[in-house]
Image (cartoon, rainbow, N blue to C red):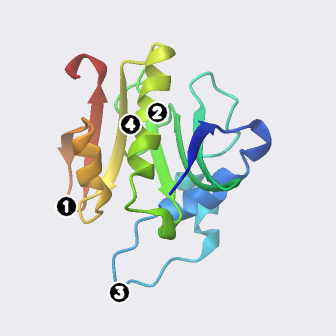
Amino acid sequence: MEYTIREMTVMEYPLLNEFLYEAIFIPDGIKPPPKNIIASPELQIYVDRFGASKADFALVAEVEQKIVGAVWVRIIHDYGHIDDETPSLAISLYKEYRGQGIGTDMMKEMLSLLKTHGYKSVSLSVQKANYAAEMYQKIGFDIIRENKEEWIMLWQENRH
């Protein structure tokens, strides 16, 4: 499948709400939460006033002029928070585009973009049952903390 990865435009930032919902991991057999769950404060920190901070970066994947995925970072006090110099990462792809390498390419592109802006690390939290956790490890994220359900993972430039 042909796709391109590019920086998200300011006009496209509202799409982050949609991709935030898509990013919620829903195990097989579990009913998805209502769409309005993304209005909760603990989820809105990922998208509210996106672009207002110098550490807000977003990329999209496009297939035939349709945005099918997004990866974005910002420094926020979310569950994966490490420190105030380490952005937290969120990534999301529509289901029908998963498992084809697009997410891996988006992640690599984002790591490259962060490096050009002087960031040496990025963190994320992922549910242990999420198949994407393996992909994160393959591209260099290490598990640094965990609880019963989630891993906190960290990518550091000096380790790669």
Q: Which marked residue is nearer to the observer: mark 3 or mark 2? A: 2
Q: Is residue 47 left or right of residue 115?
A: right
Tell me whether the residue at label 2 lies in contact with that at label 1, contact meaning CB atoms closer than 8 angstroms.
no
Which is more N-terminal, label 4 or label 2? Answer: 4
Q: Is residue 76 left or right of residue 58?
A: left
Which is more N-terminal, label 2 or label 3? Answer: 3
Which is more N-terminal, label 1 or label 2? Answer: 2
Tell me whether the residue at label 3 lies in contact with that at label 4, contact meaning CB atoms closer than 8 angstroms.
no
Residue at x 28%, y 62% (from the top left corner): 131
Q: Secondary structure at mark 1?
A: loop
Q: Which marked residue is nearer to the observer: mark 1 or mark 3? A: 3
Q: Give coordinates of residue 4: x percent, y percent.
A: 58, 44
Q: Residues within 10 Å of mark 2 (few under 14, many from 20)?
A: some
Which is more N-terminal, label 3 or label 1? Answer: 3
- Could you say which is closer to the camera, residue 131 or residue 54? 131
Residue that carries the numbered disc 4 in the rendered image: 81
Q: Residue furthest right?
A: 11
Q: Give coordinates of residue 13: x percent, y percent.
A: 71, 44
Residues under labels 2 and 4: Cα distance? 21 Å
Residue that carries the numbered disc 1 in the rendered image: 148
- Could you say which is closer to the camera, residue 157 or residue 138? 138
Kind of residue indicated by mark 1: Lys
Q: Secondary structure at mark 3?
A: loop
Q: Residue furthest front?
A: 2
Kind of residue indicated by mark 4: His
